[in-house]
Image (cartoon, rainbow, N blue to C red):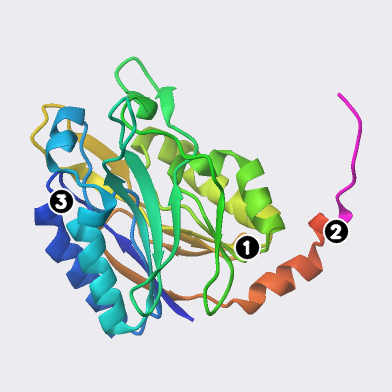
Amino acid sequence: MKTALLQLNVSDDPVANLPGTVQMVRQAVDQGAEFVLTPEVTNCLSTSRAHQAQVLRREPEDETLAALRDVTAECGVHLLIGSLALKTDDPEGRFANRSFLIGPDGGILGRYDKIHMFDVAISDTETYRESSGYRPGTQAVLADTAFAPLGMAICYDMRFPKLSDALVGAGAHILTYPSAFSPVTGAAHWHSLLRARAIEAGAWVLAPAQTGTHPGRSDKQRRTYGHSLAVDPWGEVVLDAGTTPGVYVFDMELDKVAEARRRIPARDNARPFDGP
């Protein structure tokens, strides 16, 4: 099936970001896509928690979610909103990093809150503490579609194979990792991690990504790696979008899942063991 990864370079202004995202969804559909995916934090990428508190909304009031549901219904396709930053009832005032799978009627088929928080010190000058602004999710999510069961994950989740193993064990044929990846760790690990998840799962891995230097009001500008990837169940990179924002369409051959699992039946060969 024709599938499109949208590679975005969003700012910290959800209202300004929305028209371009809607336009890109329409472009993907015009190119024949039946399934469209956007990256992590599609609505707003900001390094300022105070600014986020001003511009973010709760799920029922979020304009990005409403508009993307409308365009999905209008076009009659499936859309994975990689994630939206949303306000919550968290007592510490933390936001949710929430992914949505939207069906052809505009209905929400699945919602997933990012479980693993990116709390790392990459270097003396590049430190992240995602858990200070976002509350972690607790529930793994497998969503049903008309074409294949889909396991929902976000960005840093790709480093935790127990999550993908649980999703595949529940029936997933597709794993999604929408991302806003650091350029430093992206250059070192992005391709390797995504290919590994595809190979061990015998599943399609789809990772739409943010890219470039992101406009914003904060003095600290955020940069992301780009390279939206589609990896087939044999571990072959079918699409690498490089670093340019845009619409990237490819053919997702879903019969490759059964073929890869037949050739290497790793799950059937797994055995219990003791220790260490």
Image point (53%, 79%), residue name: 146
The mark closer to the camera, 3 or 2, is 3
Under circle 2, the secondary element is helix
Q: CA distance from mark 1 to mark 2?
A: 16 Å
Packing grade of label 2 (10 A; few <14, some 14-19, many >=20) is: few
Q: In the displayed structure, does residue 145 sit left or right of residue 51?
A: right
Can you give x and y, in whole percent of width and height, for residue 243 in the image?
A: 30, 53
Q: Looking at the rendered structure, which numbered label has been put on residue 14?
A: 3
Cβ–Cβ below 8 Å for labels 3 and 2? no
Read off the magenta span. Answer: 269-276
Image location (x, y in percent) of residue 251: 48, 78
Res. 160 in view:
yes
The residues bearing labels 3 and 1 have C-alpha atoms spaced at a distance of 32 Å
Q: Which mark sits nearer the N-terminus, 1 or 2?
A: 1
Q: Is residue 235 left or right of residue 265?
A: left
Name the element at disc 1. loop
Magenta stretch encompasses residue 11: no
Residue 213 versus residue 264 in the image, above or below: above
Residue 31 in view here: no
Residue at the disc numbered 1: 172
Disc 3 marks which amino acid?
Pro
The percent coordinates of residue 19 (x first, y second) are 13, 65
Disc number placed over residue 148 in the picture, else none: none
**Snapshot quadrant of residue 225:** top left
Q: Which is nearer the N-term, disc 3 or disc 2?
A: 3
Mark closest to the chain's N terminus, 3 or 1: 3
Q: Quadrant of the C terminus?
A: top right
Q: Residue at x 66, y 42 (%)?
A: 162
Label annotation for residue 268: 2
